[in-house]
Amino acid sequence: MSGRFIMGRLLQVVPTVAGILLVSFLLVHLAPGDPVTALAGEHGDAGYYAEMRERFGLDLPLPQQLATYALRVAGGDLGFSYVQGRTAAAVIAERVPATLLLTGTALLLAIACAIPLGAIAGRRPHGVRDVGISALALGFYSAPVFWIAQLAILFGAVRLGIAPVQGMQSAGSNAQGLERLLDVARHLALPAMVLASQEIATLVRLTRSGVIDELSRDHVRTARSKGASELGVLVRHALPRGLLPSVTVIGARAGHLIAGAAIVEIVFGWPGTGRLLFTSLQTRDTPVLLGIFLFVAFAVVLVNLVTDLVHAAIDPRVRLG
Amino acid sequence: MLRELVIRGFVCPSAPKFVLHALYLSLALGCSIDAARRADRAFVVAISHDPGHLNPAITTNGGVNTAAGLLYDGLLRLDESLTPTPALATRWETLDGGARHRFHLRRDVRWHDGRPFTAADVEFTFEQVLLKFHSRTRASLGPALVDVVALDDSTVEFRFRRPYAPLLQQLDVVEAPIIPRHVYVGSDPLRNPANRHPVGTGPYKFVSYQSSGEIRYAANRDYFRGAPSVDTAILRVVPDPATQVAALEAGEVDWMFSVPGPERERLRHHPTVRLLQSPLGAGGNNCITTLGFNLDRATFRDLRVRKAIAHAVNRPQIVERVLFGEGRAADAPISSRIGFAYAADLPIPAFDTLRAAALLDAAGWRRSGSGTRTARGVRGVRDGTPFVVGLTVLPSQSNYAELLRAQLRAVGIDLRVGSLEQAVFAQTVFTERDFDTAIGAYCNGTDPEIGVRRMLVSSSIAPVPFSNMAGYRSASVDSLFELAASALDPAQRRLYYRSMQEIVVADQPYVWLAETLGTRAYNSRCSGFGASSHFLATASCTR
């Protein structure tokens, strides 16, 4: 894998992110709804609206607003949150770790569960295990995530009491070190599992079909005729090549996970960017909204880059081509 | 028992083998539960939104008011019947026939940082903050007020251009929280860092605002109305109401502000949960869910059509099916909770589908069989046009919309419901006026001047959310509101409001559907809650 390959990919990041930001800016400003009416609530008068518009620069023509915004973002300034009165960067930054923790855990959990399950299912297509695993995966795939989340809360937290209902830490907890880690882990368990359940479904199905494809290929027959054990054939010969489509999809899902965690974050009261995105959308807090779009855009582009690198590592054709 | 052993003896921090921590993570998860139980239990309040800051003087945002109410005081308090009682002010007098209102302040109040509270704080709060940034106080009090002046350390005077009757209803902590001059003077109040590290005079002091959105308060031991018995209050952001209910059942949360209708029955029978009804809530008191007609549309300029729809609406059924019995069929434009202005015996159209059908027939909307009516000779409408009416609602009001659709179908009106998210609803209905009918939750507040005037006077036909939705104009109604606002004699004021309501009911620009209540729920280990923003100040808890 050459440095030029990576550099070439990195150079694409800037125009991609700029493009995403431009489209988001236009979408947010052209969509109906006005941050100042959202801020004033039900009782503003004309003078209040005019003053607030001027204060936030909303009285300027759209191209000028865009130019101001673009210049500021280029200088690393995301602007002030209309609602919170602090920099949008500060508002977003304090939420990012929670989201990364949740989505990262969910993704790892999904990968750790889905690949073995997919391999088991793919080994004997239409066998008992395959039917069981595939049916379960299909079930999770088709169930809406908010419903699974509600069920998890009702049974996991309220009935069985194995995990807390909401939040990231116990209320009023000042725990540090290991105790804090355990407290967060306990709160993380349900939301991460719910979020993972959706990803597991996709990955299991992909891994399964990948493995089925590979098992019928010549190199697997060669491996078997060399006398490799069935497990060895599966793990060393069929699975790595069968995983190629999954790697691509994992990359694509990582971006989806960061934005799509919103519902899980809302249901479990998890203090992440998804929840912030939702409230900022309701209040038309444009600087925060665009800041989150920027963060997600960067995350998706970077994850895609990593996906390409991993892909290149597994599949020589990508490197050479 | 086994779990207990594992936790205490095996995996808790005393265990040396860290590998086991990882292996038995799932079992060890119980560890911190025990830790939390051993500590003194804090009172945990579930809030729906992360308020972002805790300065209720710069916003009318309900989330900020809910979260910050415990930290501040107003000059006055309003009791359950909305009668003003002393808070930061001990007594007050009206001078020069209402041109001046003088308030005598307590001398024993200190800010949470120890500095004494004085009249200068009140002058600063009104002049520099409330009248600029609190959109409701600015819009209602602003035009009538000349200035607010501190006469000495403990006397403050409000001077008016014209007599202003509702003043005393607008000085509680929700409408006019007093903030410290020494913290805010010379700064931009919208960006002052103290908005996230607030200093107040209220029953609770600010402790911390965690990045996770958890807000911690401690009882103000020196509170001038007596120290609260509950030592620590923790506000947790739990956006989903169903999750709030689950957290309450599991004992993670001790208080929630608004229980969704379908969950009430279940919670009513829960062993450790109690329910409490209240018409008061930060940002929205004494609300009436109201159906508004767009009077710019030809169809609704015909009074017979408006009266017919009013007759076709079954309000008791709305209370039963949408509010699950907790509320009241509205029978006047002013909420029955505002006792001094409410009129009990107004000729509100009763539920009567035959009368509705007759009125529609007379208006030219004819029906054959049981289908949708069509126009025949309706002015401004082509003959044969089916009677299809749009109903624009917020997502939270879609239950009303569905029931209204069924009720109006019975008289041959085809209601098409469109649900719009808050910001888009405001723009569509109030800025673009692109709707046939719409539902709004008009909160009357503590005085008709705050919450009723805005939906009826012609000057508030404006691109402001929840202003005069119908686009209703009546010169007599406009002048009756003017008279009522400057009538200092309560009996006289009552008469003006009564005449106003009679005109409005006859003109029927709106159908007043139901007075709603908020249902709070709390853990039964606590009791003695108040109804106001200071609900926790009087409560006590066991364990």
Image: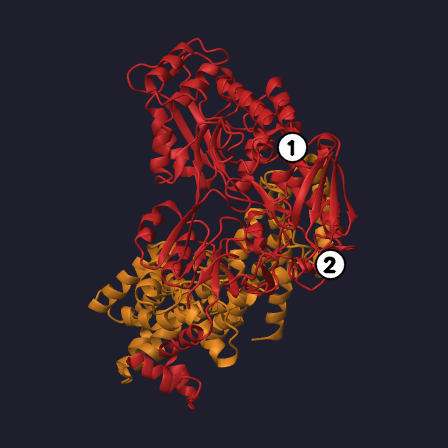
Quadrant position of residue B385: top left
Residue B373 to residue A36: above or below: above
Q: Are marks 1 and 2 on the same chain?
A: yes
Furthest-bottom residue in this view: B16
Q: Residues within 10 Å of mark 1 (few under 14, many from 20)?
A: some
* Residue B278 as seen in the image, left or right of residue B467: left
* Residue A201 as seen in the image, left or right of residue B283: left
Where disc 2 sits, the SS reads helix
The residue mark sitting in front, 1 or 2, is 1
Residue B462 in the image: x percent, y percent?
Answer: 63, 30
Where disc 1 sits, the SS reads helix
Residue that label 1 marks? B165
Mark-to-mark CA distance, 1 and 2:
32 Å
Residue B248 to residue A217: above or below: above
Letter of the chain shown orange in the rendering: A
Letter of the chain shown red in the rendering: B
Quadrant position of residue A52: top right
* Residue B136 as seen in the image, left or right of residue B81: right
Q: Residue at x 46, y 19 (%)?
A: B306
Q: Residue at x 60, y 50 (%)?
A: A24
Residue that label 2 marks? B183
Q: Chain of mark 2?
A: B
Residue B64 in the image: x percent, y percent?
Answer: 58, 52
Q: Residues within 10 Å of mark 2 (few under 14, many from 20)?
A: some
Q: Residue at x 49, y 33 (%)?
A: B335
Viewport quadrant of the N terminus of chain B: bottom left
Which is more toward the observer, A184 or A45? A45
Q: Amino acid at mark 2?
A: Val
**Contact? badges 1 and 2 (CB < 8 Å):** no
Q: Amino acid at mark 1?
A: Ala
Residue B298 in the image: x percent, y percent?
Answer: 51, 17
Residue B283 visible in image: yes
